[in-house]
Image (spheres, rainbow, N blue to C red):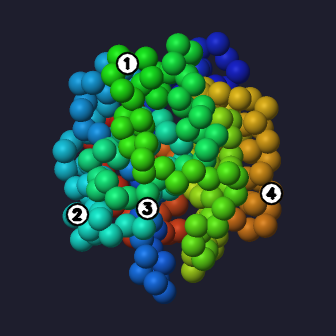
């Protein structure tokens, strides 16, 4: 959703993709996943959230297999934040995979029951939330952290209290995977706010952090934009778009 300051705009919807990133260090061959997306229970996800199209073969486990990647050999999953559409598939992936998440995000997610933020974490759904089911796998981060050479996380709260973006140094330049701080390019230029901000002050500060990195030559990559697969595709070595009738 986009909020352009007009009363109706925050309720206008668009089709957007679920995006996960597979990162490989070419020297070591080590692999990291950034987010793992939703599961493919369309009925439940539509009831709790919005209508969506997810086929079994689009699940991250199947996408990794189609690329010849053994999910059990990943170094870990960098979780930008704990919303259902970024993490809910995790319980179908190997139990040994560590989940790198900001400590503030886990604390915030756990505190949302009974608030307007509960829906995105499913804390009011009547069952144990999906992000509690993998509690033993969290590697909790406190602020900026180098994960591996050329790979680091940057706290960018605002969309949620503990959101983080991922800085990746590549042969084609330095990218920042901005997750839901920048859902679509319109959130960046011309700077239209998304309609789902948990903390406005923190969000504005995170935008300034990203702008500082852009001034140093980084490219900001949105989290839910089909143009990742078209006009921005040259930034990446390989890209595997999957598009159905609609996304959430």
Nearest to the observer: residue 93 or residue 219: 93
Specify which label sits upstream in the sequence, 2 or 3: 2
- Please identify, in this view, whether the residue under mark 1 or under mark 4 is nearer the observer: 1
Q: How dense is the environment of label 4, judged by Cα within 10 Å: few (below 14), some, or many (20 and up)?
A: few
Labels 1 and 4 touching (C-beta < 8 A): no
Q: Secondary structure at mark 1?
A: loop
Spatial CA distance of label 1 from label 2 is: 31 Å
Badge nearest the viewer, 1 or 2:
1
Picture quadrant where residue 51 is located? top left
Decide which of tag 1 and tag 4 comes sooner along the chain.
1
> How far is disc 1 from disc 4 in space, using C-alphas?
39 Å
For the point 42% across and 51% down, the residue is 137
User: Which labelled disc corresponds to residue 212?
Assistant: 4
SS of the residue at dot 2? helix
Hey, which quadrant is residue 39 in on the image? Answer: top left
Task: Of the two numbered discs 3 and 1 on the same chain, state the one appearing first in sequence.
Answer: 3
Q: Which residue is mark 3?
A: 76
Give the distance between the C-alpha atoms of the residues marked 3 and 1, in whole angstroms. 28 Å
Q: CA distance from mark 2 to mark 3?
A: 16 Å
Q: Are marks 4 and 3 in contact (CB under 8 Å)?
A: no
Residue drawn at (58%, 20%), measured in percent from left and top? 10
156 displayed left or right of 31? right
Which residue is disc 2 drawn over? 65
């Amino acid at each position: 959703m986009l909020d352009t300051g007009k009363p109706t705009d925050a309720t206008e919807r668009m089709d957007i993709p679920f995006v996960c990133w597979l990162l490989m260090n070419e020297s070591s061959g080590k692999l990291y996943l950034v987010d793992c997306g939703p599961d493919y229970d369309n009925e439940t996800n539509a009831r709790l959230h919005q209508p969506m199209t997810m086929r079994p073969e689009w699940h991250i486990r199947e996408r990794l297999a189609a690329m010849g990647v053994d999910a059990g050999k990943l170094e870990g999953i960098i979780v930008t934040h704990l919303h259902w559409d970024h993490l809910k598939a995790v319980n179908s992936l190997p139990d040994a995979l560590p989940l790198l998440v900001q400590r503030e995000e886990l604390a915030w997610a756990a505190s949302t029951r009974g608030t307007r933020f509960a829906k995105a974490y499913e804390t009011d759904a009547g069952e144990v939330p999906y992000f509690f089911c993998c509690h033993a796998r969290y590697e909790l981060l406190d602020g900026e952290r180098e994960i591996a050479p050329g790979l680091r996380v940057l706290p960018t709260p605002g969309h949620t209290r503990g959101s983080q973006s991922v800085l990746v140094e590549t042969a084609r330049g330095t990218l920042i995977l901005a997750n839901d701080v920048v859902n679509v390019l319109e959130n960046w230029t011309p700077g239209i706010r998304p309609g789902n901000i948990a903390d406005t002050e923190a969000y504005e500060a995170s935008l300034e952090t990203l702008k500082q990195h852009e001034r140093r030559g980084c490219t900001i990559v949105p989290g839910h934009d089909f143009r990742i697969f078209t006009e921005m595709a040259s930034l990446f070595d390989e890209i595997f778009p999957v598009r159905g009738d609609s996304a959430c």
